[in-house]
Structure formats: C-alpha cells, structure tokens
Image (spheres, grey):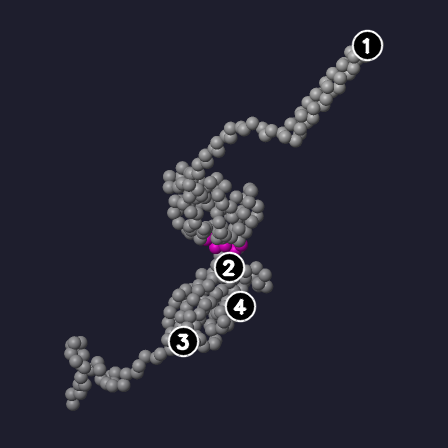
Amino acid sequence: MPITFIEPKRRKYYLILLLIVVVIGVLFLIWNYFFLKAPPPPVNPTPPQEIKINFETLEKPFLIESQPFEGIPFPSPGAKDVSLTPTLSWQSVSGAEIYVWEIIGVKSDQTEQTSVTISKPLNTSTTYVWRVKSCNKDMSECGAWSGDCQTGGEVGCWRFTTIAHLPLILVSPSPGAKDVSLTPTLSWQSVSGAETYFWNLIGIESGQTSSTSVSISKKLEPSTTYVWRVKSCNKDMSECGAWGAGTFTTISGLLPPELISPPIEKIFIGRENPFAPYSEIKPAE
C-alpha cells in the first residue's frame, strides 16, 4: 500500500522545484533591469560644424542692412527755426568711403565728408525731411538710410522746419568790423512788413524802434569786441523774424601824436622838389 503514494510525492517535489526556479528567474530579471540597468550602447557623436566668420564684412558696418547712424545729427530731429541755408552734419561710420545725402524732394548728392552746406536757400516756414546712407566708393554696397520716418517715429525721423522770416542784414558796423567809434550808430536793412525792430547791443543797451538805425548813447570801451543783433517784429512783438547778428571791435582809444616842430605852415614853403630836405625858407624882403 505505501507504494501508491510515491508518485504524487515526486510530482509535488518537481512542482516546488519548478516554482523555485521561476521565482529565481523573476528576481534575476528584476535585479538586472531595475537595479543594474546597463548603460545604452555608445553613439558615435556628430563632429561640430565649423563656423567661419568673415571679419572683412564686420569691419565694414555699412554693409549691414540695418546699420543705424550713431550720435545726434544736425539739425536734430524736429528742430525749429533752422537757417534757410543749413549745414547738415552726421557722425562718421567706420569703413564708409562715401556718404549719399538727400533732402527729400529738394536735392540729393554724395560726399566723402560728414557734413554738407546747402547753397540754394530753402523756403521759409517749411518742414523738410533729410537722410543719409553710407556706401563704398562705387556704391555697389550701401547701408540703410538714416532717419527713417516710416519706422523710426518722431525721434528717429530727421525732420526740421525752417525759420518763418528772413534774418536782418546788418549794414553798419559790418560784421567783423574793426576800429569802430566808441559811440557808433547801428544800422540795418529794412524788412518788408516789419512794424518795429528790436535791437540789442549785448550787455550794454537794448530797445526797439520803427527806424532802421539807432545811435548808442553810452560810450563804449576802447579795443573791445561787442556783439549786436536786430530782429523785425509786428507792433506787439508777438511775431518776430530771426535775429541778424554780428560783431565789431572799437578803436584803441590812442590819439595820434600832435606835430610840434616845425610848424605846418613852414614845412611846405618852397617844396618844388619833393625830395629836397625840409628847411625853413624865409620869404624875400
């Protein structure tokens, strides 16, 4: 009878052994994949791409399309009462060989300098827009225009307005005059439509008159340079033109020496020969 139990026991033994093997396998897999995870296989790195910089281009900023002009130009953006023959000036651009300038709708040209003077007078009380760009000599490559009123706004727009009236032309003393009297008379040309003139000898005297001249009552200092100016206005001086200004220098104040001897009437007696020495000639008795 005991022999009948041998086969079930052996089967139970094999099942337990199989279960132990399965548990060990599972534990091995868990250990490998969660605790001893192997690093990924090495990947051949892509060599870095070489970057080449064209330093010649960087040294010529006028080749950059968005290159702005540095510094504040003259006339400054939005300037008022600008001369009718203004001098436009801008800051230099490193590497620029030539500058192309333009007063839009009036004149355009090119120059190697950083300024240009407008020879033909502009209109009074008129707003103008101007701009400049830097280029190489053959103008095959240029930077962007400065003073772009489309994108630059009011600050970035190179716009100016000319004076409302012509400046006065000073007559006497002429600008820069020397040896002017210590009690000079200031005079100027009349301006059409002017009702009064406001004049100023700076630091000395000022006033207004309907005439085109005024005499200085206070005696000036000798060998001194003075600045004077005049502008034309309406009667209540609510509207005035531009100043006309100039300088002059007074006389030294030294009087010429007086002749003592020989007397004047005796010098020219008998001077038929101008090269003969001076001598006193007695008239014949």
The residue range painted magenta reads: 80-86
For image coordinates 48% across by 53% down, the residue present is 74
SS for callout 3 = loop
Q: Residue 4 bears which disc, if any? A: 1
Q: Which residue is mark 3?
A: 222
**Where is residue 100 shown, x and y percent of the image?**
43, 44
Question: Which tag, 1 or 4, sits closer to the chain's start?
Answer: 1
In this view, the residue in front, 195 or 165, is: 165
> For the residue labelled by badge 1, is the local secondary structure a helix, a strand or a loop?
helix
For the residues labelled 2 and 3, the Cα–Cα distance comes to 30 Å
Mark 2 or mark 4, which is nearer the start of the sequence? 4
Point out the frontmost of discs 2 and 3: 3
Mark 4: few/some/many CA within 10 Å (<14, 14-19, 20+): some
Report the mark closest to the observer, 2 or 1.
1
Q: Which mark is residue 242?
A: 2
Give the quarter of the figure containing the C terminus. Answer: bottom left
